[in-house]
Image: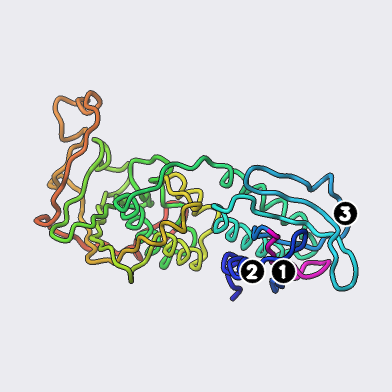
Amino acid sequence: MREPSASVFDFLAKDVSAAGSFHSRKSGTTAAHGEVLFAVDAGGRPTLLVPAGTLVRAMADWHSKSLSLQTLQLAVDDGKRPFMILRCLDTKLNHQFGLLADDVLDAIESNPDKASSAVTATLDRWRNLFEAERGSLLGAAHLAGIMGELLVLQQLAESHGARALSAWQGPKGHRHDFVLRDCSLEVKATTNHNNLVVTIHGGRQLAQPDHGELYLRAFQLERTPVGTSVPGKIAQLIELGLSRLDLLTALEGAHYSDADASTYEEVKFSVLSEKSYLVDESFPRITPETLVPPGMVERLSNIAYSLDLGQLEETSLSLEAVVLADAGPS
C-alpha cells in the first residue's frame, strides 16, 4: 500500500533544498513520460512533480491563493524535461494537499498515458474545497458530535462499502443525519461521564421520516490521549474506500475544515457506551405531531431541549441489516 502523500511531504520538509530547487523523492507512480515525484520547494511547500510530454505552459498554468499549477523545464539526471508542478501555497492546507496528491496519483495510476489530464481533472474537482472560507475553530463538544456521526458512517461503510457515504445527509441540511431506504438515523454524542443526556435542536429533528422508522443512535465519549481524533477517523474512513474529496466536502457542510486538522489531532475520544433507541409514539420528543394545535411548531423558534436517555428502553439496531437508499439489500 502506498504511503500517504502527506507523510512523505512532512518528511521531505525536514530537509528543504537550496533556493530555486526542489528536494524530491520518487512516488512509486509512473506516468507515460516518467515517474511522478514528491517534492518540497525552498520554502518547504509540498509539491507534486508530474512528467509531461511537451511544454504546454499556457494551457496548464494556473494559481489561486491556495494552489498553483505550472509547466516548466526542470533539470534531472538525463537533462532537462518538462514537468507539471502542482504546489500548495497555504501551509495551513498542507494536510489537505496531501489528500489531493493521493487522488492525483490514483488517477495517474488508472491511466498513465493521460497523466496531464489526470492532474487537471482532479484539480478541477478539488478546487472549490481549497478555496472555501474557513470558520472559527470547533470546540470539543462540536468535534464529539462529528465523531459520533463518523462512527456511524464507519459502521455503515464496513458493511456496505464506500456507497455508505451517500446515506450521510445531515451535512447537506436534511433533518436527519442518515437517510436509508428502510429507516433514518439521528446521531447524538456526549462527553458527560455521569449520564447519557443529549440535546435536541428544533421541532423536526426527531420528526418521523418520510419512509420507515426513525432511530436515535447515542454515543457516550471520553476525551483521552489514547483515543482517536476526528482527523484520525477520517483517515480510517479513507482506508475503507470512501472518496477523499466527497468525505471532506461533506465535513465542510458540518463546519469542519481539514485545514485545521493539525489542531484537531490533539482532541481524541474513546467510546464509553453506544446505545440505540426507536423513536416512536412513546418516545419523549417535541415534533409537529406532539404539539397542539397542528402547525404550532412553525410558530416556535429556537427550540432546544435536553433529553435524558438513561431511563429509556434501548432497542437493537444492526447497521449490517439496513438498506442503502440507492441500492438493494447488501
Q: Decide which of tag 2 and tag 1 comes sooner along the chain.
A: 2
Most foreground residue, 34 or 72: 72
Does 155 sit above or below residue 128?
below
Cα separation between marks 2 and 1: 7 Å
The answer to whether residue 19 is left or right of residue 221 is right
In the picture of the structure, the residue carrying the numbered disc 1 is: 24
Residue drawn where x is 71% and y is 55% of the image: 86
Residue 303 position in % (x across, y down): 22, 34
Cα separation between marks 3 and 2: 27 Å
Kind of residue at disc 1: Ser
The local crowd at label 2, few if under 14, some if 14 to 19, many if 20 or more residues have their Cα within 10 Å, is many
Q: What stretch is highlighted in magenta?
A: 30-42
Kind of residue at disc 3: Leu
Does 9 sit above or below residue 61?
below
Secondary structure found at label 1: strand
In the picture of the structure, the residue carrying the numbered disc 3 is: 55
Using the rendered view, name the quadrant where residue 298 is placed.
Answer: top left
The local crowd at label 3, few if under 14, some if 14 to 19, many if 20 or more residues have their Cα within 10 Å, is some
